[in-house]
Image (tube, grey):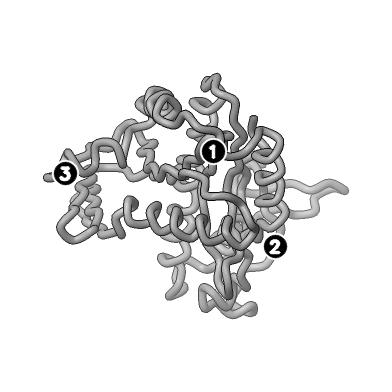
Amino acid sequence: MQLNDIKILPYQMKLEQLFVRTPRNHKQYKLIENQLLRERAGFFGESQIIYPLKKWKSPHYSVHQIRLPLHTNFFQIDTFVLTPRYGIIIEAKNYAGEVTFSNDFNQVIQRKEEAEQVYTDPVIQVQEQKYQLELWLQQHNYPDIPIVPLVVMTNPRSLLKTSDRDYYKKRIISLPRLSSRLREIDEHFKREVISMGEALTLGKLMLKENKPYNPDILNRMKVERDELISGIVCYECGSLSVRRINRSWECVQCG
């Protein structure tokens, strides 16, 4: 059972508005655009996890887009699946183009349209999430729940490569492989650690403590308020061209 919906979070909402209202010649415009494209891709990737989970018949609860406090910091999880016997952290990645995983340097190299971008290995990322979640569970006096970290590549058009297939083959999977991987994990764990009722209580506690990232977007992106373009956004074409015409509002750009 899904305990919360995947939705556009405050950080992406603010980036969407800032992108529309920042002049194209602004020195931070490209940075804002790149950050927004990453957030959009992440949101799309996370939303692709829902359908395989709904098909899965094993009793479970799932929570999505969780950002939990730990000591003086926070840690984020795309999707956490909880059963009485184990939990699964799912990190969704929506990389496009050619994607090469390097275990030697714990890097991901994305090649797209003759450009290269380097990211941290998502396996390292999800393993760190597992460690932090274990500490968080200890803080809340939960027993040791086995947790499986899993990276799911959600873009069907990405070309995945690696020189270390044995290391990555069960740690990183494609989206069509998720359903069968869930069944494999389910068969591996036999002993119940908590009840379904306790699993539900834990899921609700995560939602209660969830603190979505919600920064001062102007300060974060180094844009001054008086540099923004004012006006009313047209939700049809996205331009700031809505005007009061003949007692009604009309976009002069698209009508």
Disc 1 and disc 2 in contact, CB within 8 angstroms: no
Of 119 and 137, which appears nearest the observer? 137
Whether residue 19 is situated above or below residue 87 in the rendered picture: below
Image position, residue 255 (x, y; %): 67, 41
Query: What residue would you read off at disc 2?
Result: 231
Q: Position of 205 compared to 239: left or right?
A: right
Question: Residue at left 42%, top 42%?
Answer: 148
Q: Position of 35 compared to 74: left or right?
A: left
Q: CA distance from mark 1 to mark 2?
A: 43 Å
Q: Amino acid at mark 2?
A: Gly
Q: Amino acid at mark 1?
A: Val
Query: What residue would you read off at disc 1?
Result: 81
Question: Residue at left 51%, top 40%?
Answer: 87
Disc 3 and disc 2 in contact, CB within 8 angstroms: no
Whether residue 34 is situated above or below residue 175 in the rendered picture: below
Image position, residue 15 (x, y; %): 56, 60
Circle 2 SS class: loop
Q: Can see residue 88?
A: yes
Of 148 and 234, which appears nearest the observer? 148
Query: What residue would you read off at disc 3?
Result: 162
Whether residue 181 is situated above or below residue 88 in the rendered picture: above
Image position, residue 154 (x, y; %): 39, 36
Q: Residue furthest front?
A: 191
Circle 1 SS class: strand
